[in-house]
Image: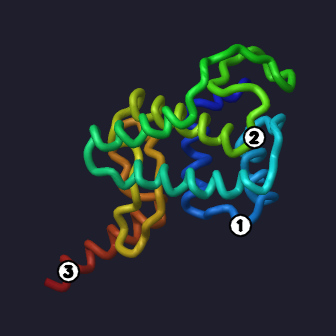
Amino acid sequence: MHLNPYGQDAVRLIADLANDPPRSLPDLVRRCAAAGLVLDMPVGEQDLTVALELVDQWSEIVDATEPAQRATLVNRLLAAASAYPRLTDHGGTGWHLHYRDEGVPLGAVLRALVSVGTALHLAGRGMSRLGRCAADGCRTIYVDTSRGGQQRYCSPRCANRDAVRRHRSGRIR
């Protein structure tokens, strides 16, 4: 199976990085590799800084309340990562599209992956398909890939805890 790096996998990776920011370059590299990113690009300390800035910029997209505002922020990311699409067969993974120049460092690769992946996710699934958990006290970001597009919680645990809280508050009254 060929991983589509510009689909939901890139959005899930950035959500993971936003919810638990990488603490070091090796941590960032390990998590990118675990997400299926072929690491055939230069990697340096500046990539951690770029990745953390990208997390902040992407979190603004998550927190945007209006579709037009989200689109503006995604377009800003796309403009910063723009390169012409090209076919590549790097690493023997099969021919596929890249939206980045060859030889760019990991931080720039992440910017391209995340910007295009987020644009595809929102355009293909719906502009409301990113959010923060609705449970009291939880700020975890989720990527809504549910069939119905009605996700409100980051996990079943938070959904259950919130349902119990609502049930108990109704009982007390």
Question: Could one spot residue 71 in this view of the protein?
Answer: yes
Q: Residue furthest right?
A: 92
CB-based contact (under 8 Å), mark 2 and mark 3: no
Q: Spatial distance from mark 2 to mark 3, Cα to Cα?
A: 56 Å
Give the mark, 2 or 3, whose residue is nearer the N terminus: 2
Give the mark, 1 or 3, whose residue is nearer the N terminus: 1
In the rendered structure, which amino acid carries the disc numbered 1? Answer: Arg
User: Residue 94 versus residue 58: which sits nearer the camera?
Assistant: 58
Could you say whether the residue bearing mark 2 is in a helix, strand or loop?
loop
Q: Which residue is mark 3?
A: 171
Q: Quadrant of residue 127?
A: top left
Tell me the tag on residue 105: 2
The residue at the point 61 percent across, 35 percent down is 113
Q: Which residue is mark 1?
A: 23
- Left or right: residue 38 versus residue 6 is right
Could you say whether the residue bearing mark 1 is in a helix, strand or loop?
loop
Q: Nearer the viewer, mark 2 or mark 1?
A: 2
- Left or right: residue 79 versus residue 84 is left
User: Does 127 appear above or below 45?
Assistant: above
In the rendered structure, which amino acid carries the disc numbered 3? Answer: Arg
